[in-house]
Image: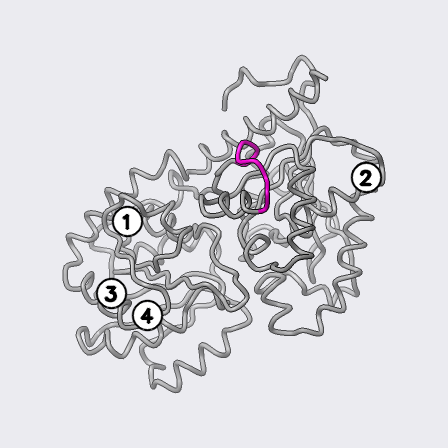
Amino acid sequence: MDSGNSPSACMPKPKLLVLASTYPRWKGDYEPGFVHELSKRLTREFHVTVLCPSSYGAKSREELDSVHVVRYRYAPEQLETLISDGGLIENLKKKPWKALLLPAFLLCQIFALLRLLLILKPDVIHAHWLIPQGLCVSISQLVLSRNIPVLVTSHGADLFALRGRWFDLLKRIVLTRASRITVVSTVMKLKIEQLGISSEKVMVEPMGVSLGQDFHPGAAESRRGASILFVGRLVEKKGLEYLIYAMPTIMQHHRDAFLRIVGFGPQEQNARELVAALGLEDRVQFAGPVSNKELPEFYREAAVFVAPFVEAANGDQEGLGLVLVEAIGCGCPTVVSDIPAARDVIDGLDGVITVPQKNSDAIALAVSEILGDLTDFEEGARESGSRIKERFDWEAVAGRYEDILLELLEGDCSR
């Protein structure tokens, strides 16, 4: 972080209000924690409060790593399941009846936000996801006639999956009213420019991975034979089915090949049924959700990591794919579908093979190639892991976000 941007002359430690939908429900939760990982590092420069939806078993208010977390209620506790175990869009796709919760979800978020704006009086706002968080901020600012500087970050699904004239209109409203916009990959910046937003307002700033402390290579001999690893939510855009279909072909070349699936989500039952239909029960392990502290060992033990990303039927696709950064950081040879966002991570790196999306034969060929020459591929992956720290390590990422927020605050103070 550039300390020269510090607004200490204006206010010693300003108040930052963060809005998110996906957020850990408790310490050590297996839900994606990237918003919390960024927020807790921002406490070095800000008093950070996070507003997020309530979930079954979570406290309404608590302190997590010096971050004050406020969770708003939007339904009876047992029904507060719109976000957890798969994310908003996937949960609605799997169980359409949950759309009945959306009006209360949005209204309760706006009400909770209005209350915080009046009581907390934040100096700057960071809204993760254009819809609903960015939209709720725009509505609340209009209601209160406030003009607090706002950073809006899009992570992918909000930009790719929410399609149509009305969604595009809502996105334009959010993007136009935002003080600054960040996206996590280059392809997302191009998508926002297509909505008529000036490129000067948009910055490509990914989320991070703890490469220095957690996701780093272990001993080379720790890798297990022909072990294949998948990590991610079990949803359509992760493409797990294409990796499962590739397993019989992989096993023709490597009889001891086995697949470990780390993750959870609404498509788990479909994946289990496919494994059974192909007679792969003894070659595929569903490890379930794993905490961030345990995850590095899975990457260090795997001979190859596969990220078979696809564009889903509704247009949703990976915004970046931080699992790639985690795997490469741990020195794990990697196979990944050639989707636009992945190129921001893998371009110019060794130890990685790209394949066309939705192509099980290509996945099988690439995995077999790595398993047949594991030493060379692992050496390339280890070298690549040391080259991605500057861009993706959390300390570097948090420093860049600190600079953006402090610049917004400094600009607001100067008026």
In the foreground, 50 or 367: 367
Q: Which residue is mark 3?
A: 367
Say whether disc 2 or disc 4 marks the residue closer to the N-terminus: 2
Compared across the picture, whether 262 is left or right of 113 comes to: left
* Residue drawn at (37%, 52%) of the image: 324
The span shown in magenta is 195-202
Residue 359, label in figure: 4
Name the amino acid, label 3: Val
Q: Is residue 102 above or below residue 179?
A: below
Residues at marks 4 and 3, CA–CA distance in whole angstroms? 13 Å
Q: Nearer the viewer, mark 1 or mark 3?
A: 3
Q: Which residue is mark 2?
A: 142
In the foreground, 244 or 395: 244
Q: Is residue 198 magenta?
A: yes
Do the residues bearing badges 2 and 4 touch, measured as CB atoms within 8 Å? no
Residues at marks 3 and 2, CA–CA distance in whole angstroms? 53 Å
Name the amino acid, label 4: Asn
Q: Residues within 10 Å of mark 2 (few under 14, many from 20)?
A: few
Q: Residues within 10 Å of mark 3 (few under 14, many from 20)?
A: many
* Residue drawn at (25%, 60%) of the image: 303
Label 4 element class: loop
Say whether disc 1 or disc 3 marks the residue closer to the N-terminus: 1
Compared across the picture, whether 391 is left or right of 122 comes to: left
Do the residues bearing badges 3 and 2 touch, measured as CB atoms within 8 Å? no
In the foreground, 80 or 338: 338
